[in-house]
Amino acid sequence: MKDCASRAQHYHDLALEFLVLTRIKTAADIKENYRMMGQHYLARARAELARAKRRASATNLEIASGSALAQSS
């Protein structure tokens, strides 16, 4: 997985798998472990999306700064 968006999608998919597992009939402690893992991967997915947005805004700032410099020259 090369970029933040694909990692975020991967973590989201893992979270869904764990959250689906909480619906099976099994011991309460096992369901709680699945729920915690699902929450963990959702948090990681959100973090990767935030990282992708920061990188995109930083890239846009670099492009904007470069074009402003080119226009002033």
Image (cartoon, rainbow, N blue to C red):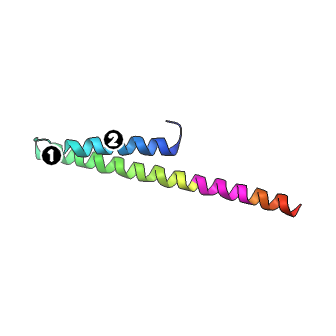
Q: Position of residue 39 (x, y in %)?
A: 30, 51
- Please tell me which residue is depicted at 37% across the width and 52% down the height of the picture: 43
- Please tell me which residue is depicted at 44% across the width and 46% down the height of the picture: 8
- Please tell me which residue is depicted at 82% across the width and 60% down the height of the picture: 69
The C terminus: image quadrant: bottom right
Q: Which residues are magenta?
A: 55-64
Main SS type for the magenta part?
helix
Q: Which mark is residue 40?
A: none
Give the residue type at disc 1.
Asp
Closer to the eye: label 2 or 1:
2
- The residue tagged with tag 2: helix, strand or loop? helix
- The residue carrying pointer 2 sits among few (fewer than 14), some (14 to 19) or many (20 or more) residues within 10 Å by Cα, namely some
Q: CA distance from mark 2 to mark 1?
A: 19 Å
Q: Up-down: is 20 above or below 46?
A: above
Residue 56 in the magenta stretch? The answer is yes
Give the residue type at disc 2.
Leu
> Are the two marked residues, 2 and 1, in contact with CB atoms closer than 8 angstroms?
no
- The residue carrying pointer 1 sits among few (fewer than 14), some (14 to 19) or many (20 or more) residues within 10 Å by Cα, namely few
Q: Quadrant for residue 68, please give it.
A: bottom right
Q: Is residue 2 left or right of residue 10?
A: right
Mark 1, residue position? 29
Q: Position of residue 9 (x, y in %)?
A: 42, 43
Q: Residue furthest right?
A: 73
- Please tell me which residue is depicted at 65% across the width and 53% down the height of the picture: 59
Q: Is residue 65 left or right of residue 4?
A: right
Q: Position of residue 71 (x, y in %)?
A: 84, 61
Residue 44 or 19: which is nearer the viewer?
19
Residue 57 in the magenta stretch? The answer is yes
Q: Is residue 59 left or right of residue 43?
A: right
Mark 2, residue position? 14
- The residue tagged with tag 1: helix, strand or loop? helix
